[in-house]
Amino acid sequence: MRAIEQITDLKAIIRSYKKTDKSIGFVPTMGYLHKGHTSLIKNSKHDNDITILSIFVNPAQFGPGEDFESYPKDLQNDLQIAEKAGVDVVFIPNAEDLYPNNFKTYVDMKDLPKKLCGKSRPDHFKGVLTIVTKLFNIVEPHKVYFGQKDAQQVIIINKLIKDLNMNIELIVCPTVRETDGLAMSSRNVNLNPAERKKAAILSQSLLEIESLIKNGEKDAKKLHDHIVNNINSVDIAVIDYIEIVSADNLEPIVTLYGKVLIALAVKFGKARLIDNIIIEV
Ligand code: AMP
């Protein structure tokens, strides 16, 4: 495995892959790797000749007062995990190279970034769209791998690829969970043992909603009330949002039909956790 810091060095490597017609799979991450990340790597290795992983905590997607400074990091461990998972090139760029002093261009999108997570994180997706576009331009991947755990991110990046005519295929990989159902996340490390135990309510509530829907419940308000009550029964859980929306356009749904996304963000102490399910009704 090669570890590359400089954009120009990575571009030279990419050029050599392109000359020999190698297919390139790309997995962008913020590091502190776990099994959710390695599942994306596994999928990329299955589909492509070369797998490139990036590790970069992108300052542009954190708002004031968010956890940019305290975002968990362990580069040495990440490199071991990446190597073991069979990554060919790990790209670890510097913030100064990606965002030099005279940096002026940001990528933004109408509507979608303002919904769900965007209500409490107004500039988050502008930062995501900008870094993802930059990394796609540097890596020039054929396929990119993202996790369903970040459902809104997947919908927004899919739209970015379509709207800007990028020659890239987006592959969405299922959410990898702990044994009690909690979605794996680098931020889970911020949970103390009591919070960690109680955080299982999120996936449990989503599973309950799934079975209510499978048993014929189509009233979004009833389902919403059910999940709100469920999560509020945990004393330390602070709901940021729970929404039942169309998985195509993130618009609220009154009576369930089509591809429905049930997404939530809930704080447990310092950690803001997200989770979701998509159900075809
Ligand atoms: P992050 O490092 O948290 O920015 O995540 C990098 C990529 O890994 C994103 O595409 C995430 O959606 C994906 N990811 C994070 N956690 C999981 C998980 N538990 N299961 C599947 N994919 C995940």
Image (cartoon, helix red, strand yellow):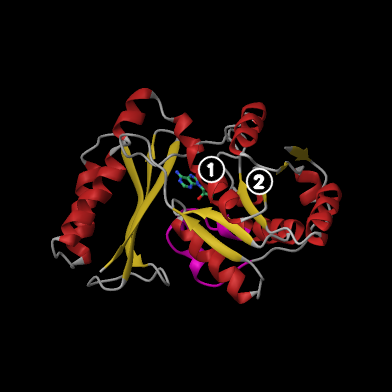
* Label 1: element kind: helix
Q: Which residue is mark 1?
A: 37
Neighbourhood count class around disc 2 (C-alpha, 10 Å): few under 14, some 14–19, many 20 upward: many
Please report contact status of discs 2 and 1: CB closer than 8 Å, yes or no. yes
Q: Is residue 100 visible?
A: no
* Residue 210, horizontal then vertical, whole percent: 23, 56
Real-space Cα separation, disc 2 to disc 1, in angstroms:
10 Å
Q: Quadrant of residue 256?
A: bottom left
179 or 105, nearer to the observer: 179
Residue 115 horizontal side relative to residue 68, left or right: left
Q: Is residue 200 above or below residue 51?
A: above
Q: Which residue is mark 2?
A: 53
Q: Is residue 43 above or below residue 218?
A: above
* Label 2: element kind: strand
* Residue 168, horizontal then vertical, whole percent: 63, 67
Q: Which residues are magenta?
A: 108-126
- Amino acid type indicated by mark 1: His
Q: Residue at x 65, y 75 (%)?
A: 165
